[in-house]
Amino acid sequence: MVVNPQGVPDAAREEERDRRLRHRICFLLDSGALCLFVLFLIHLLPVLMESKPAQAEWQAKFVETMDQEAILAFIGFVLLHLAVYLNPKKQILRKRLRQIRHLAVVACVGFLLMIPVQLASSLQAFRAVQVKQSDNAALVNRLLQVRESISKATSKEALNARLIALAEPELSPRQKTLRLADLQRELLMDNDQRQAVFTRGNRKEETSGMSPFTLMISRVASMLVWCAAFAAGAVPWGSKKALLERLRPQFQRT
C-alpha cells in the first residue's frame, strides 16, 4: 500500500478526490436543472397571466409557447436524472427527482390535450385564410372593374356614376374640373398604385411564415415528441415503473 508523507494512503486520497468531484458536478447539475425549470416558468407565466382559454388566439399562443419552451424543462429533467445517477445516496435529490417524475405525468397529459387544441386552432386558421382569399379575389375583381370603367368612360358624369356604383369615392370638385383624358390618366395611376400595394401585401403574407396546414403538422408532431420524451422518465403516483415502460406491453400486444 502506497502512503503519502501525511500518512494517508494514495488510494484513499484518490477516492476522496473523486467523491468531491462527483459532489461538485452533482451540485452543478442540480443547480442547472433548477435554473432551467425556473426559466421555463418565467417564459410561461406571461401567457398564463392573460389566460383566455376560450379564445383561439390565446390557445395558439399557449401551444406555441409550450412547444418552444418545453426544451428548457426537458433538459432540466435530464440534468436532475444525471445528478441522482452521480450521487444516488443523497436523499434530497432522490426526493426531488421523484416529485419531478410525478409531475412529468401531468406534462405528458398536457401535451396530449394540446393536440386537439392545436387542431381546433388550425381549423380556425384555415377558415380565416379562406375568408382572406375570398376578400382578396373580390378586391382584385373590383379594381379590374374600376380600371375598365375608367378606360371606357365617355364622359365625366358617366364615370362618376360608375365609380359610385362600384362603391368607389366619387369625383372630387378638383377632379371634375379636369379634362376627361387627364382625369382618366390620374385615376388609372391611382388604380395601379392600389394594385401594387395589394400585390406587395399578398407577397409579404405568403413569405411571412408557414401555412396553417404545415404549422398544424409541425405542432402536433412536436406535442407527440415531447409527450414521449417526458413519458420516458415520468412515473405515475403509486408506481415504480416509468410511464413509457408501463405502456410498452400494451403496444406490444397490439
Image (tube, rainbow, N blue to C red):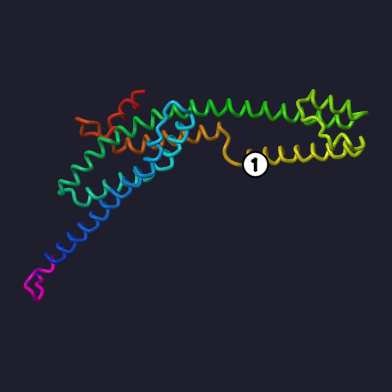
What is the count of numbered marks?
A: 1
Q: Relative to 130, is 233 above or below?
A: below
x and y percent of residue 78 in the render?
Answer: 31, 46
Q: Quadrant of the C terminus?
A: top left
- Dot 1: few (<14), some (14–19), or many (≥20) neighbours within 10 Å? few
Magenta-drawn stretch contains 7: yes
x and y percent of residue 183 in the render?
Answer: 88, 37
- Residue 207 falls left or right of residue 191: left
Q: Quadrant of the N terminus?
A: bottom left
Residue at the left extreme of this rendering:
7
Q: Relative to 67, is 149 above or below?
A: above
Within the image, what quadrant is residue 240 found in? top left
Residue at the bottom extreme of this rendering:
5
Magenta-drawn stretch contains 40: no
Residue in the image at 71% along x and 28% along y: 137
- Per the picture, the main secondary structure of the magenta-coloured stretch is loop
Residue in the image at 44% along x and 27% along y: 117
Residue stretch rendered in magenta on the structure: 2-11
Q: Amino acid at mark 1?
A: Lys
Closest to the observer: 77 or 207?
207
x and y percent of residue 195 in the render?
Answer: 75, 37
Closest to the observer: 140 or 5?
140
Residue identifier under label 1: 204
Within the image, what quadrant is residue 186 found in? top right
- Residue 81 falls left or right of residue 50: left
